Image (spheres, rainbow, N blue to C red):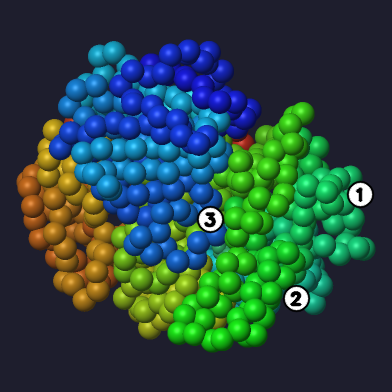
């Protein structure tokens, strides 16, 4: 059951698709306090309560014991103590022995979460705006404990809508790098993969494909003929996926700017002039996506590139990221001057650094501009966390208008609850660190709880130089995530798999992924269409097993499997906890793997560098298709079953054309175990 309580004067909801009546009285079990415009809820926690949710955040799967803040941030340093990343995902499950529930704070402003940090026995949630709807979700009557967390997520999805459906090709391997500018890079990268038979379905273009980082333009030198090159690559099964940034370069004569300025589509300062701040193209203006007309205008621009054969995009810098505003820069220079003219003291350098550092993504700037929301003029900081969601919505709507019957690839950096209807997300600027490989794994179930089923991190890590072993282990995790993209930053070591001596090991892992795609796609579609989760914490499925609940480095995948990737260097394997008997599949290639039945409990599983495991639950199986180099090569016909000898298990395999929304195309093929076709 979902109950809604309104506080203050909530903004029109982006997240909720259900219009529930708001109840008058406050929820009885939450202690409510109001102070200086802020509203806080406090709840006592029992020793064994687990807290799941908050989507994209650094930290453990069970969120307890830490502090978080919902404040969409262009945060390139995902350090242990960071409280905010790019998305605000105010959904939290309080999983307890009696009366478990979930809550969702539909609040686009800053929210602080103390989940047992000050006091392990207490959680406290504070809305700084005090204008929001609070939804309290309780399990449907009769739900078994095993299904409670999934049921709470399902109801949250009923409230916020069905998840975005990507095209099937989006499950293919995608190669990306900040620095790819045009035809030469695209052709070389595609060729290098094809020559070595490394599967590939997409190449991302980063900001350098544009003319001076201007959205919806092309770098004429590097990419004179996008249509031609996109067509040639597509005929070989490779899609080109350009980036679009939120900021529009301020420059008279650049048509996107001229239109936006003349029509008044950009965010305004208090004096009515356009708000300006620098991002990649230099001083830029920011479309006011809260306005219907501005959103439509920007969304329709995607067509410029779609008409050249583009079928997918990634939206970036949409928190929005602000390098500096002219006002912020003046202030920093003034502070520096003041320091210079005064006496230098031991802390002058810190003050100077703070003044310079503070020009980036500054609160002063977020308070400097306004949005039109219907009849209201609202200062940006009050609704900050919605900006990226609305950019993605504009893009999704633009693509839907252009081609209503076709699925498009779209993933965004910034997001809010409800963005899962419009696209996927990637986890932003991680580093080539082992700890970020583990973070990637832990964030998967939390993002799924928000409905972001199509998600993944930059495989190999974005910042810093990757080493070969880390890249191998990362590819072995990416092989299971719907978005499987190798992306890295300008200036870092080149990270395409073919650059490394052991590229064959990586190729083989990618090939295993392709063999699994028919099954993985089916499980992803099942999660989307049933408002379920593809990745779940073990505690969801085994709520009464305290060991399963404590596991933070393994996750359930689909209805049949569990994954437990190797997350450390130089190890010959890893410890794995099995909450029930499972079949270990130790993959080397799609054709070369061994299987072993393992009993419930702790096990040390040996995994050489070229091996990675998939655990299949007793009595079930998955299918393994003949691998290919493009998703279009894959077929369910002739696929082998892989798993337990299970006469009474029928795998409901979801199949469709992978590109339209046509319901008649979507159908379930019941797959039974065929011992003869099983390999090995
Ligand atoms: C941001 C993005 C990153 C991209 C870079 C350049 O840092 O998060 O993925 O490569 O900008 O566009």
Nearer the observer, 352 or 20 = 352
Residues at circles 2 and 1 in contact by the CB criterion of under 8 Å: no
Q: Where the C terminus falls, by quadrant?
A: bottom left
Q: Where the N terminus falls, by quadrant?
A: top left
Q: Residues within 10 Å of mark 1 (few under 14, many from 20)?
A: few
Whether ligand 1 has any atom under 8 Å from the Cβ at mark 3 is answered as no
Answer left or right for 18 relative to 97.
right
Answer left or right for 557 relative to 539.
right
Q: Above or below — where is 12 with respect to 533?
A: above
Q: Quadrant of residue 230?
A: bottom right
Image quarter for ligand 1 equals bottom right
Whether ligand 1 has any atom under 8 Å from the Cβ at mark 1 is answered as no
Q: CA distance from mark 1 to mark 3?
A: 30 Å
Answer left or right for 58 relative to 288.
left
Q: Earlier in the sequence, mark 2 or mark 3?
A: 3
Whether ligand 1 has any atom under 8 Å from the Cβ at mark 2 is answered as no
Identify which residue is drawn at 33% across, 25% down: 30
Nearer the observer, 82 or 469 = 82
User: Mark 1 = which residue?
Assistant: 262
Per the image, label 2 sits on a secondary structure element best described as loop
Q: Earlier in the sequence, mark 2 or mark 1?
A: 2
Residue 420 marker: none
Residue 73 marker: 3
- Nearer to us of marks 2 and 3 is 3
Residue 394 in sight in this render? no
Identify which residue is drawn at 72% across, 70% down: 330
Per the image, label 1 sits on a secondary structure element best described as helix
Could you say where residue 515 lies in the image, as x and y percent from the top left? 38, 53
User: Mark 2 = which residue?
Assistant: 222
């Amino acid at each position: 059951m979902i109950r809604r309580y309104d506080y203050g004067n909530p903004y029109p909801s982006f997240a909720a698709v259900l219009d529930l009546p708001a109840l008058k009285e406050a929820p009885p079990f939450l202690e409510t306090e109001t102070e200086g415009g802020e509203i806080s809820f406090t709840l006592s926690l029992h020793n064994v309560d687990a807290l799941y949710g908050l989507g994209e955040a650094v930290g453990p799967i069970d969120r307890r014991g830490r502090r978080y803040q919902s404040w969409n941030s262009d945060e390139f340093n995902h350090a242990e103590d960071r409280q905010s990343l790019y998305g605000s995902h105010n959904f939290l499950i309080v999983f307890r022995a009696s009366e478990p529930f979930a809550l969702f704070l539909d609040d686009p402003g800053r929210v602080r979460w103390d989940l047992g940090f000050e006091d392990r026995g207490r959680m406290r949630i504070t809305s700084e705006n005090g204008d929001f709807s609070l939804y309290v979700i309780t399990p449907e009557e009769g739900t078994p404990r095993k299904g409670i967390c999934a049921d709470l997520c399902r109801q949250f999805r009923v409230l916020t809508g069905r998840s975005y459906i990507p095209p099937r090709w989006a499950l293919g391997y995608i190669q990306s790098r900040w620095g790819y500018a045009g035809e030469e890079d695209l052709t070389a990268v595609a060729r290098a993969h094809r020559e070595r038979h490394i599967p590939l379905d997409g190449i991302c273009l980063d900001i350098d494909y544009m003319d001076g980082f201007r959205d919806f333009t092309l770098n004429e030198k590097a990419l004179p003929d996008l249509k031609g090159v996109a067509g040639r690559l597509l005929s070989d099964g490779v899609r080109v996926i350009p980036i679009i940034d939120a900021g529009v370069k301020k420059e008279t004569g650049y048509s996107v700017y001229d239109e936006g300025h003349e029509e008044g589509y950009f965010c305004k300062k208090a004096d009515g002039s356009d708000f300006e701040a620098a991002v990649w193209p230099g001083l830029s203006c920011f479309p006011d996506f809260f306005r219907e007309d501005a959103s439509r205008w920007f969304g329709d621009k995607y067509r410029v590139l779609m008409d050249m054969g583009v079928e997918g995009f990634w939206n970036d810098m949409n928190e929005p990221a602000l390098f500096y505003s002219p006002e912020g820069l003046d202030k920093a220079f003034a502070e520096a001057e003041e320091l210079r003219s005064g006496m230098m003291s031991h802390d002058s350098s810190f003050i100077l650094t703070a003044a310079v550092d503070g020009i980036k993504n500054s609160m002063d700037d977020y308070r400097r501009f306004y949005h039109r929301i219907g009849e209201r003029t609202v200062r940006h900081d009050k609704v900050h966390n919605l900006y990226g969601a609305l950019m993605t919505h504009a893009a999704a709507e633009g693509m839907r208008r252009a081609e209503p019957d076709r699925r498009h690839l779209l993933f965004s950096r910034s997001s809010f609850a409800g963005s899962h209807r419009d696209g996927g997300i990637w986890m932003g600027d991680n580093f080539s660190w082992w700890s970020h490989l583990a973070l990637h794994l832990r964030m998967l179930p939390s993002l799924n709880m928000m409905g972001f089923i199509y998600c993944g991190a930059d495989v190999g890590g974005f910042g810093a130089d990757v080493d070969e072993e880390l890249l191998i282990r990362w590819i072995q995790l990416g092989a299971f995530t719907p978005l499987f993209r190798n992306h890295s930053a300008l200036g870092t070591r080149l990270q395409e798999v073919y650059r490394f001596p052991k590229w064959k090991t990586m190729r083989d892992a990618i090939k295993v992924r392709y063999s699994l795609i028919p099954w993985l796609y089916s499980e992803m579609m099942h999660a989307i269409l049933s408002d379920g989760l593809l990745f779940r914490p073990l505690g969801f499925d085994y709520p009464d097993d305290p060991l399963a609940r404590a596991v933070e480095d393994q996750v359930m995948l689909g209805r049949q499997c569990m994954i437990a990737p190797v997350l450390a260097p130089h190890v010959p394997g890893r410890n794995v906890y099995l909450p029930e008997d499972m079949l270990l599949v130790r993959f080397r290639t799609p054709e070369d793997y061994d299987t072993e039945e393992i009993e419930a409990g702790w096990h040390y599983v040996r995994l050489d560098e070229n091996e990675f495991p998939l655990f299949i639950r007793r009595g079930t199986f998955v299918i393994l298709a003949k691998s290919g180099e493009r998703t279009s090569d894959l077929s369910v016909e002739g696929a082998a079953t892989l798993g337990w000898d299970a006469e009474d298990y029928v795998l409901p395999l979801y199949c469709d054309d992978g590109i339209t929304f046509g319901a008649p195309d979507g159908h379930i093929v019941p797959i039974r175990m065929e011992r003869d076709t099983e390999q090995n």
